[in-house]
Image (cartoon, grey):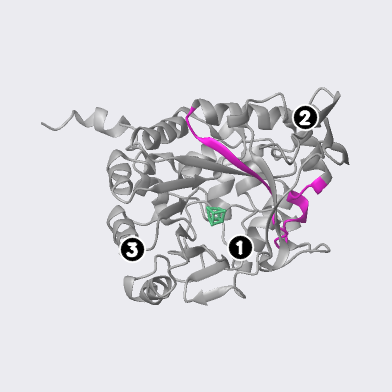
Amino acid sequence: MKPPRHLALVAPPPPRETWRDQARAAVTSLEALERHLVLTDAERAGVARSLASGFPMSITPYYLSLCDRHDPRCPVRIQCVPHASEGVEVPGDLRDPLGEEAHQVAPELVQRYPDRVLLLATDRCSVYCRFCTRSRMVGQDGGARSEQRLQPAIDWIRAHPEVRDVIVSGGDPLVMSTRRIERVLAMVRSVPTVETIRLATRAPVVLPMRVTRALCATLRKFAPLWVMTHFNHPKELTPQAVTALERMADHGLPVMNQTVLLRGVNDHADTLEALFRGLVRARARPYYLLQADPVRGTGHLRTSIATGVAIMERLQGRLTGIALPRYIVDTPEGRGKVPVGPDYVVAREPGVTALRTFRGEVVRYVDPPADLS
Ligand code: SF4
């Protein structure tokens, strides 16, 4: 039966709850963004620059709803709204900071370590993060890669049995349909020497409704499969995001979180403590705190390494070990990750190491005799 005409007229628009509706309704223009946020001149210039420069803007209605309408210092807004400073290059900036193009071993396949590879399954994301390491290529080359386009990469992995771990990334692989994700994962799993698959995605943060039961059941078929995600601020741990994390855990999918250290977003120990505690409560492991890669145009978002070390010093002893990530610098040009942190070794002499505890006490650890049988 049709509703009375006056009710039909006042009925609210259908809720944008499915991930496809959210992705379709993503804000990609200045006009649309200005309907939601009161922009500063620097943000307006940043959006105009982004639309012209090739590193696009896209913000899901869900993620946009987490942005403060009036405050340009909002930690969510900083991550997704372009800023004029993206046009400023500072010393150390690189177009491809991890040297992925130089380490490409097959189309869409990057190898920086002997036992693992990175498979770039798409160049699309639902939100383009302003700190993205792959800003040089995301959103620019046609979306999800076909099986035909990925086949040479799979052939390369098959010919290199030393590769045990494949990171399926992009772009964000979870903007692809579940059926397509299943086909890509099946291609990877068809290589018997691949032991683990990691799926790198920001969907739990920016599009949590994407983490449906059907998706989790599909991912579970390819276990051991680890989900690597990127929560950067406690504001992102909404009830929907927590449901997404818990759903993955309930399906036996381990979730590891890589937080990027960002100026004005999370460069404070109290902020990170709240984030890491919240992640552990949602059964996601804070895995890395990443020093932001020196991507061209992100100088305004990066901190010094000394800032990161000072934060880690404050968190050590304050957080349980399962909530404390390692602080990592991914060295420029793809030379590999280096763990960095406060130095707790005060002195070394034969058989004795002097260590500084988180309380500042110096304690001597005596090694056992080497010839004890
Ligand atoms: S989701 Fe990942 S690949 Fe996409 S823009 Fe954000 S950081 Fe870059």
Instruction: Return the x and y of residue 49 as percentages of the image width and height.
Output: 67, 63
Instruction: Return the x and y of residue 142 as percentages of the image width and height.
Output: 43, 70
Mark 2: which amino acid? Arg
What's the CA distance linking mark 3 and mark 1? 33 Å
Mark 1: which amino acid? Ser
Residue tagged by mark 1? 135
Please, what secondary structure does the residue beneath circle 2 have? Answer: helix
What's the CA distance linking mark 2 and mark 1? 32 Å
- Is 295 located above or below residue 217 in the figure? below
Which mark lies nearer to you, 2 or 3?
Answer: 3
Left of 277 or right of it: where is 22?
left
Q: Is residue 294 magenta?
A: yes
* Magenta segment: 282-305
What's the CA distance linking mark 2 and mark 3? 44 Å
Q: Mark 1 vs ligand 1: CB under 8 Å?
A: yes
Residue tagged by mark 3? 192
Left of 224 or right of it: where is 31?
right
Q: Earlier in the sequence, mark 2 or mark 3?
A: 3
Q: Nearer the viewer, residue 142 or 115?
A: 115
Residue tagged by mark 2? 314
Q: Residue furthest left?
A: 1
Q: Earlier in the sequence, mark 2 or mark 1?
A: 1
Q: Earlier in the sequence, mark 3 or mark 1?
A: 1
